[in-house]
Image (tube, rainbow, N blue to C red):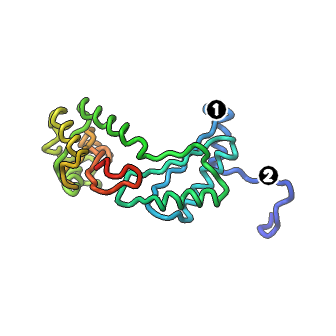
Amino acid sequence: MNPETPPEEGASKRRHFIQLEIDADLKSGRYQRVQTRFPPEPNGFPHIGHAKAICADFGLAEEYGGVCNLRFDDTNPSAEEDKFVVAIKEDIRWLGFDWGDNLYFASDFFEDLYGFAQHLIRTGFAYVDDQDLETIRATRGNRARPQDPGTDSPYRNRTPEENLELFEGMRRGEFEEGARVLRAKIDMGASNHLLRDPVLYRIQNAHHHRTGNDWK
Protein backbone atom coordinates (compact mmCIF):
# COMPACT_ATOMS: atom_id res chain seq x y z
CA MET A 1 0.00 0.00 0.00
CA ASN A 2 1.28 3.45 -0.88
CA PRO A 3 2.12 5.51 2.25
CA GLU A 4 -0.21 8.26 1.02
CA THR A 5 -3.11 5.85 0.60
CA PRO A 6 -5.47 5.81 3.62
CA PRO A 7 -6.27 2.38 5.09
CA GLU A 8 -9.42 0.72 3.88
CA GLU A 9 -12.52 1.23 5.96
CA GLY A 10 -12.90 -1.59 8.48
CA ALA A 11 -9.26 -2.66 8.18
CA SER A 12 -8.00 -4.03 11.50
CA LYS A 13 -5.36 -2.07 13.37
CA ARG A 14 -1.98 -3.69 13.82
CA ARG A 15 -1.50 -4.88 17.39
CA HIS A 16 1.72 -3.93 19.14
CA PHE A 17 3.98 -6.33 21.02
CA ILE A 18 2.51 -5.65 24.46
CA GLN A 19 -0.98 -6.50 23.26
CA LEU A 20 0.34 -9.65 21.61
CA GLU A 21 2.03 -10.73 24.85
CA ILE A 22 -1.15 -10.14 26.83
CA ASP A 23 -3.24 -11.95 24.22
CA ALA A 24 -0.94 -14.98 24.45
CA ASP A 25 -0.93 -15.03 28.26
CA LEU A 26 -4.71 -14.81 28.50
CA LYS A 27 -5.24 -17.44 25.82
CA SER A 28 -2.84 -19.89 27.47
CA GLY A 29 -4.38 -19.35 30.88
CA ARG A 30 -1.12 -18.11 32.35
CA TYR A 31 -3.01 -15.12 33.75
CA GLN A 32 -6.74 -14.67 34.24
CA ARG A 33 -6.96 -10.89 34.17
CA VAL A 34 -5.02 -7.74 33.37
CA GLN A 35 -3.82 -5.45 36.15
CA THR A 36 -1.45 -2.60 35.41
CA ARG A 37 0.10 0.19 37.44
CA PHE A 38 1.04 3.82 36.87
CA PRO A 39 3.68 4.68 39.52
CA PRO A 40 4.70 8.37 39.27
CA GLU A 41 6.87 10.18 41.78
CA PRO A 42 5.13 13.44 42.77
CA ASN A 43 8.28 15.53 42.39
CA GLY A 44 7.22 17.65 39.40
CA PHE A 45 4.44 18.48 37.00
CA PRO A 46 3.46 15.83 34.42
CA HIS A 47 5.13 15.91 31.00
CA ILE A 48 4.75 14.10 27.68
CA GLY A 49 6.51 11.02 29.04
CA HIS A 50 3.92 10.73 31.79
CA ALA A 51 1.14 11.07 29.22
CA LYS A 52 2.57 8.19 27.21
CA ALA A 53 2.80 5.96 30.28
CA ILE A 54 -0.70 6.93 31.43
CA CYS A 55 -2.20 6.02 28.06
CA ALA A 56 -0.33 2.71 27.99
CA ASP A 57 -1.05 1.66 31.59
CA PHE A 58 -4.65 2.82 31.86
CA GLY A 59 -5.42 2.14 28.20
CA LEU A 60 -4.35 -1.50 28.31
CA ALA A 61 -6.28 -2.12 31.52
CA GLU A 62 -9.36 -0.55 29.95
CA GLU A 63 -9.00 -2.53 26.72
CA TYR A 64 -8.92 -5.85 28.57
CA GLY A 65 -11.49 -5.01 31.23
CA GLY A 66 -8.81 -4.91 33.90
CA VAL A 67 -7.66 -2.52 36.60
CA CYS A 68 -4.90 0.09 36.71
CA ASN A 69 -3.52 1.10 40.10
CA LEU A 70 -2.41 4.69 40.58
CA ARG A 71 0.49 4.34 43.01
CA PHE A 72 2.51 7.39 44.00
CA ASP A 73 6.15 6.57 44.73
CA ASP A 74 6.50 9.21 47.43
CA THR A 75 9.65 8.14 49.24
CA ASN A 76 11.76 11.30 48.78
CA PRO A 77 10.25 14.06 50.95
CA SER A 78 12.77 16.71 49.93
CA ALA A 79 11.49 16.69 46.34
CA GLU A 80 7.78 15.90 46.59
CA GLU A 81 4.72 18.10 47.15
CA ASP A 82 0.95 17.75 47.27
CA LYS A 83 0.53 20.09 44.30
CA PHE A 84 2.26 17.53 42.08
CA VAL A 85 -0.10 14.80 43.29
CA VAL A 86 -3.05 17.02 42.37
CA ALA A 87 -1.58 17.88 38.96
CA ILE A 88 -0.96 14.23 38.08
CA LYS A 89 -4.51 13.27 39.05
CA GLU A 90 -5.94 16.13 36.99
CA ASP A 91 -3.97 15.13 33.90
CA ILE A 92 -4.99 11.48 34.17
CA ARG A 93 -8.62 12.56 34.15
CA TRP A 94 -7.96 15.05 31.33
CA LEU A 95 -6.64 12.14 29.26
CA GLY A 96 -9.91 10.32 29.86
CA PHE A 97 -8.95 7.80 32.54
CA ASP A 98 -9.82 7.18 36.18
CA TRP A 99 -8.30 4.97 38.89
CA GLY A 100 -11.53 4.45 40.83
CA ASP A 101 -10.73 3.02 44.27
CA ASN A 102 -7.24 1.94 43.23
CA LEU A 103 -5.23 4.84 44.67
CA TYR A 104 -2.10 4.02 46.67
CA PHE A 105 0.96 5.77 48.09
CA ALA A 106 4.28 4.15 48.96
CA SER A 107 4.08 6.15 52.20
CA ASP A 108 1.03 4.08 53.17
CA PHE A 109 3.46 1.22 53.73
CA PHE A 110 6.29 2.98 55.60
CA GLU A 111 5.50 1.10 58.82
CA ASP A 112 5.41 -2.24 56.98
CA LEU A 113 8.73 -1.50 55.27
CA TYR A 114 10.26 -0.54 58.60
CA GLY A 115 9.14 -3.88 60.02
CA PHE A 116 10.68 -5.74 57.09
CA ALA A 117 13.95 -3.88 57.68
CA GLN A 118 13.92 -4.86 61.35
CA HIS A 119 13.39 -8.48 60.33
CA LEU A 120 16.41 -8.32 58.00
CA ILE A 121 18.51 -6.93 60.84
CA ARG A 122 17.39 -9.59 63.31
CA THR A 123 18.18 -12.37 60.84
CA GLY A 124 21.61 -10.97 59.97
CA PHE A 125 20.80 -9.72 56.48
CA ALA A 126 21.12 -5.97 57.12
CA TYR A 127 23.42 -3.71 59.12
CA VAL A 128 23.89 -0.06 60.00
CA ASP A 129 26.93 1.50 58.34
CA ASP A 130 28.64 4.69 59.56
CA GLN A 131 30.51 5.29 56.31
CA ASP A 132 29.42 8.18 54.09
CA LEU A 133 27.90 7.49 50.67
CA GLU A 134 31.06 8.48 48.81
CA THR A 135 33.09 5.92 50.76
CA ILE A 136 30.41 3.28 50.24
CA ARG A 137 30.50 3.84 46.47
CA ALA A 138 34.30 3.67 46.43
CA THR A 139 34.49 0.45 48.45
CA ARG A 140 32.09 -1.32 46.10
CA GLY A 141 34.98 -1.48 43.64
CA ASN A 142 35.57 -0.69 39.99
CA ARG A 143 32.52 -1.29 37.78
CA ALA A 144 34.85 -1.83 34.84
CA ARG A 145 36.36 -4.81 36.66
CA PRO A 146 33.38 -6.73 38.09
CA GLN A 147 35.63 -9.71 38.83
CA ASP A 148 37.42 -7.69 41.55
CA PRO A 149 35.57 -7.82 44.88
CA GLY A 150 34.71 -4.76 46.89
CA THR A 151 35.86 -4.00 50.42
CA ASP A 152 33.74 -4.93 53.43
CA SER A 153 32.60 -2.09 55.64
CA PRO A 154 34.31 -2.10 59.06
CA TYR A 155 30.76 -2.02 60.49
CA ARG A 156 29.51 -5.03 58.52
CA ASN A 157 29.74 -7.45 61.44
CA ARG A 158 27.90 -5.49 64.07
CA THR A 159 25.57 -7.64 66.14
CA PRO A 160 21.85 -7.66 65.33
CA GLU A 161 21.18 -6.10 68.73
CA GLU A 162 23.53 -3.18 68.08
CA ASN A 163 22.15 -2.71 64.58
CA LEU A 164 18.56 -2.67 65.85
CA GLU A 165 19.36 -0.02 68.44
CA LEU A 166 21.14 2.17 65.90
CA PHE A 167 18.38 1.73 63.34
CA GLU A 168 15.73 2.74 65.85
CA GLY A 169 17.89 5.74 66.70
CA MET A 170 17.89 6.68 63.02
CA ARG A 171 14.10 6.69 63.08
CA ARG A 172 13.98 8.75 66.28
CA GLY A 173 16.11 11.44 64.66
CA GLU A 174 19.11 10.98 66.95
CA PHE A 175 21.69 11.28 64.15
CA GLU A 176 22.49 13.89 61.51
CA GLU A 177 21.81 13.37 57.81
CA GLY A 178 24.52 11.22 56.25
CA ALA A 179 25.77 9.93 59.61
CA ARG A 180 24.42 6.42 59.13
CA VAL A 181 22.61 4.24 56.60
CA LEU A 182 21.08 0.78 56.67
CA ARG A 183 22.59 -1.61 54.12
CA ALA A 184 21.51 -5.05 52.96
CA LYS A 185 24.14 -7.67 53.79
CA ILE A 186 24.47 -9.55 50.51
CA ASP A 187 27.83 -10.10 48.79
CA MET A 188 30.64 -7.57 48.33
CA GLY A 189 32.10 -9.86 45.68
CA ALA A 190 28.99 -10.00 43.49
CA SER A 191 29.65 -9.36 39.80
CA ASN A 192 26.61 -7.07 39.81
CA HIS A 193 27.70 -4.01 41.79
CA LEU A 194 24.09 -3.26 42.73
CA LEU A 195 24.18 -6.37 44.93
CA ARG A 196 27.22 -5.23 46.87
CA ASP A 197 25.40 -4.37 50.08
CA PRO A 198 23.00 -1.73 48.68
CA VAL A 199 21.67 1.07 50.87
CA LEU A 200 18.12 0.40 52.10
CA TYR A 201 17.53 3.37 54.43
CA ARG A 202 19.15 6.76 54.88
CA ILE A 203 18.49 9.68 57.20
CA GLN A 204 16.62 12.60 55.65
CA ASN A 205 15.39 15.38 57.91
CA ALA A 206 12.72 16.69 55.57
CA HIS A 207 8.97 17.22 55.98
CA HIS A 208 6.95 14.62 54.07
CA HIS A 209 3.83 15.86 52.29
CA ARG A 210 1.70 13.08 53.83
CA THR A 211 3.45 11.74 56.94
CA GLY A 212 4.87 15.03 58.19
CA ASN A 213 7.90 14.54 60.44
CA ASP A 214 7.02 11.03 61.63
CA TRP A 215 9.92 9.53 59.67
CA LYS A 216 13.53 10.67 59.49
| Residue 32 - label | 1
Q: Which amino acid type corresponds to the residue marked 1 in the rendered image?
A: Gln
Q: Position of residue 125 (x, y in %)?
A: 26, 34
Earlier along the polypeptide chain: callout 1 or callout 2? Answer: 2
The image quadrant of residue 157 is: top left
At 59% across and 41% down in the image, what residue appears?
A: 35
- The quarter in which the N terminus is drawn is bottom right
Q: Residues within 10 Å of mark 1 (few under 14, many from 20)?
A: few
Q: Is residue 129 left or right of residue 114?
A: left
Q: Which amino acid type corresponds to the residue marked 2 in the rendered image?
A: Ser
| Total number of numbered discs in the rendering | 2
Q: Secondary structure at mark 1?
A: loop
Q: Residues within 10 Å of mark 2 (few under 14, many from 20)?
A: few
Q: Is residue 214 left or right of residue 48?
A: left
Q: Examine the rendered structure and indicate whether residue 178 appears above or below residue 154.
A: below
Q: Examine the rendered structure and indicate whether residue 98 appears above or below residue 123.
A: below
Q: Position of residue 100 (x, y in %)?
A: 61, 45
Q: Nearer the viewer, residue 194 or 78?
A: 78
Q: Residue furthest right?
A: 9
At 62% across and 39% down in the image, what residue appears?
A: 34
Q: Nearer the viewer, mark 1 or mark 2?
A: 1
Q: Position of residue 130 (x, y in %)?
A: 16, 48
Q: Residue furthest left?
A: 154
| Residue 12 - label | 2
Q: Examine the rendered structure and indicate whether residue 140 appears above or below residue 5.
A: above
Q: Position of residue 92 (x, y in %)?
A: 60, 57
At 63% across and 57% down in the image, what residue appears?
A: 93
Separation (CA) of disc 1 from disc 2: 25 Å
At 43% across and 43% down in the image, what residue appears?
A: 108
Q: Nearer the viewer, residue 107 or 190?
A: 107
Q: Nearer the viewer, residue 206 or 106?
A: 206
Q: Residue furthest bottom?
A: 4
